[in-house]
């Protein structure tokens, strides 16, 4: 079962504290997924369709318990759903008019959020829960953070957006073919919305997934940082070793001051050691800054040798040139 289906299963088990919240939830379901059909003789029929079995059972029970009507539950087979079942809950005649009026829905007018149904905060939360059950989905947080409502009526989507804003959440609107999409991005906003619905288990699952992601990301960053540090240390040690070899070749070991000679010998002997480890090998042990200072001196001596060599080569070239000019065969 997908994370979204699990969330809806949880919400369908949620029991509000008052009848007004049951009515608000049913109003949300009817507003988002209900349609009115007129049959022969002008008979009115309210139809609610869903692909989720738990939601179908929830809508059926709410209609029965809130309005004391006897809805009809029809199972449909649709080829576009890959042979999966869909469900239709129907209420006909005067009972349909009774339900629509009770849910604050006026037939033939643009749908919105019924004010008389959503006066209390708990009822506004229940209305949003009903809309989510009817037309919402939430992506598995292991993949990404995305919660959406897919609505046919753009004016209802705008009204729903304003209702969500009352909870200090910013829902974005977009078009997807003929449908209007209302969606939330970001772990924090989605977990807040799940709490509004009453899906606490789904919220905790998302927070756990977020923590696991952060731990993995932090571990990866630490590994990458360690790898970069190791690479820098290897590069520095190689540079220091080459510098020391040039200095020793030019001056000899005995010409170096004792501290520099010791440092040069330790670095050549232990090229893989860090500065801190290398300092501890000295007699007496010295700190990281001390060993770094000595190695910098050795590198500076090597650089001076490198700078002298071109000058000496140029001088020798001039001398040879002068000899060539004075040669008379």
Image (spheres, rainbow, N blue to C red):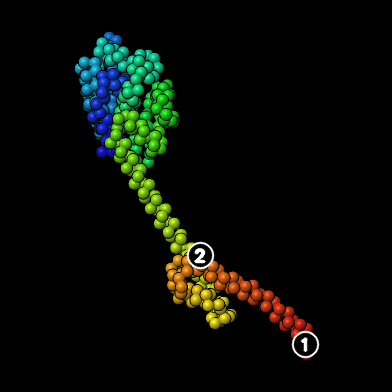
Which mark sits nearer the N-terminus, 1 or 2?
A: 2
What element does badge 2 sit on? Answer: helix
Residue at 29% across / 12% down in the picture?
Answer: 97
Q: Position of residue 164 (x, y in %)?
A: 40, 27
Side of 48 where 253 appears, left or right: right
Location of residue 45 (image quadrant): top left
Q: Nearer the viewer, residue 314 or 204?
A: 204
Q: Position of residue 72 (x, y in %)?
A: 21, 20
What element does badge 1 sit on? Answer: loop
Is the residue 79 above or below the residue 237 in the image?
above
Asked if marks 1 and 2 touch (Cβ < 8 Å), the reply is no
Q: Position of residue 317 (x, y in %)?
A: 71, 79
Label disc, if present, on residue 229 of the rendered structure: none
Location of residue 70 (image quadrant): top left
Quadrant showing the N terminus: top left
Q: Nearer the viewer, residue 148 or 119?
A: 119
Q: Which residue is mark 2?
A: 289
Q: Which residue is mark 1?
A: 327
Residue at 47% across / 69% down in the picture?
Answer: 286
């Amino acid at each position: 079962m997908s994370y979204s289906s699990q969330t809806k299963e949880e919400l369908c088990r949620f029991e509000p504290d008052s009848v007004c919240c049951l009515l608000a939830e049913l109003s949300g379901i009817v507003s988002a997924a209900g349609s009115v059909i007129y049959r022969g003789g002008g008979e009115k029929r309210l139809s609610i369709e869903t692909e989720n079995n738990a939601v179908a059972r929830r809508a059926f029970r709410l209609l029965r318990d809130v309005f004391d009507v006897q809805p009809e539950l029809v199972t449909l087979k649709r080829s576009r759903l890959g042979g999966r079942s869909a469900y239709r809950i129907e209420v006909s005649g005067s009972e349909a008019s009774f339900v629509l009026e009770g849910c604050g829905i006026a037939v033939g007018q643009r749908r919105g959020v019924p004010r008389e149904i959503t006066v209390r905060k708990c009822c506004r939360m229940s209305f949003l829960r009903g809309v989510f059950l009817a037309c919402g989905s939430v992506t598995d947080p292991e993949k990404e953070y995305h919660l959406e409502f897919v609505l046919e009526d753009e004016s209802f989507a705008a009204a729903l957006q304003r209702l969500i804003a009352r909870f200090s959440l910013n829902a974005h609107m977009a078009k997807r073919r003929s449908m209007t999409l209302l969606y939330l991005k970001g772990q924090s906003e989605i977990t807040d919305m799940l709490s509004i619905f009453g899906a606490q288990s789904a919220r905790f699952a998302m927070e756990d997934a977020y923590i696991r992601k952060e731990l993995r990301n932090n571990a990866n960053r630490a590994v990458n940082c360690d790898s970069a540090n190791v690479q820098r240390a290897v590069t520095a040690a190689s540079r220091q070793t080459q510098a020391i070899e040039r200095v020793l070749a030019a001056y000899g070991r005995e010409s170096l001051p004792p501290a520099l000679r010791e440092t040069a010998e330790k670095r050549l002997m232990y090229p893989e050691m860090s500065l801190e480890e290398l300092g501890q090998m000295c007699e007496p042990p010295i700190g990281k800054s001390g060993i770094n200072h000595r190695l910098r001196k050795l590198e500076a001596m090597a650089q001076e040798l490198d700078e002298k060599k071109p000058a000496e080569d140029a001088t020798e070239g001039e001398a040879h040139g002068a000899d060539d000019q004075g040669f008379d065969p």
